Image (cartoon, grey):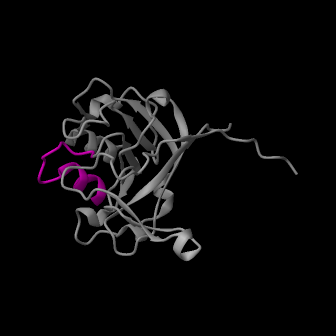
Amino acid sequence: MALLKPLKIHDLTRTISQDMQVYPGDPQPKFGPHATIKDNNVNVTRITVGSHTGTHVDAPWHFLQEGNSIDMEPLDKFIGEAAIIDGSGKNSMTGEDFSGYDIRSNDIVLIYTGTGDCRTDFAYLDISAAEWMVEHEVKCVGIDTASVEKYGEKDAPVHKMLLARNIGIIENLANLKQFAGNRMFFVCLPLPLKGIDGSPARAILFDIVK
């Protein structure tokens, strides 16, 4: 029996903490003791977080009333080969910005912008970028900012276009810079929260084994 080749894991997930930056208006994470070793012989923590805290997956129901909740989303949408795009230096990504990359049907596209720490003035996807994703049959889009949408955009056209075409959305990724321009294997698993519009998730990259 052949031994599996060990893979190096690269974590793209933001650490969730009580003092972390959240999208304006979203709840700040709160941790508190439910039980302690001193009083109960065991530590159990009560955790309060918004459904779009840190690195997270948007469910279609986030913007589409008849869309899937996060527990209904197929996991294969968030697992597969990923093309990692360098969008640094751009205020917004247009469809033309993806044309020079090796992006294939059923790929996951991950976008490094370098503006992930910006609270509101972060880079985003132009509607032409969403149209490009649809036309090229991408199955999921991830970005290192708080949203694929321009901050303050009330109608959410990018979200609605992608989610209505069954294209997954992952936001608030971390540590993408060093992998920009590469193709790698990506896994991002949301929690199966019943009837919920999104979920924090753990996102990791692997080298593709040929």
Q: Quadrant of residue 57?
A: bottom left
Residue extending farthest right = 1
Residue 16 among those drawn in magenta: no
Q: Quadrant of residue 109?
A: top left
Q: Residue at x 28, y 60 (%)?
A: 164
Residue range corresponding to the magenta coloring: 147-164
Query: Do we see residue 32 in this rendering?
Result: yes
Q: Is residue 55 left or right of residue 21?
A: right
Q: How many marks?
A: 0
Q: Is residue 2 left or right of residue 23?
A: right
Q: Residue at x 38, y 54 (%)?
A: 56
Q: Residue at x 59, y 74 (%)?
A: 41
Q: Position of residue 7 (x, y in %)?
A: 68, 41
Q: Quadrant of residue 120?
A: top left
Residue 160 among those drawn in magenta: yes
Residue in front for this viewpoint, 150 or 160: 150
Residue extending farthest top = 89
Residue in front for this viewpoint, 95 or 171: 171
Q: Residue at x 53, y 45 (%)?
A: 204
Q: Is residue 44 left or right of residue 17?
A: right
On screen, 104 above or below 78? Answer: above
Residue in front for this viewpoint, 206 or 114: 114
| Quadrant of the frame with the C terminus | top right
Q: Position of residue 45 (x, y in %)?
A: 46, 67
Query: Do we see residue 137 in this rendering?
Result: no
Q: Position of residue 114 (x, y in %)?
A: 34, 30
On screen, 155 above or below 6? Answer: below
Q: Position of residue 63 (x, y in %)?
A: 22, 62
Q: Is residue 35 left or right of residue 22?
A: right
Residue in front for this viewpoint, 30 or 165: 30
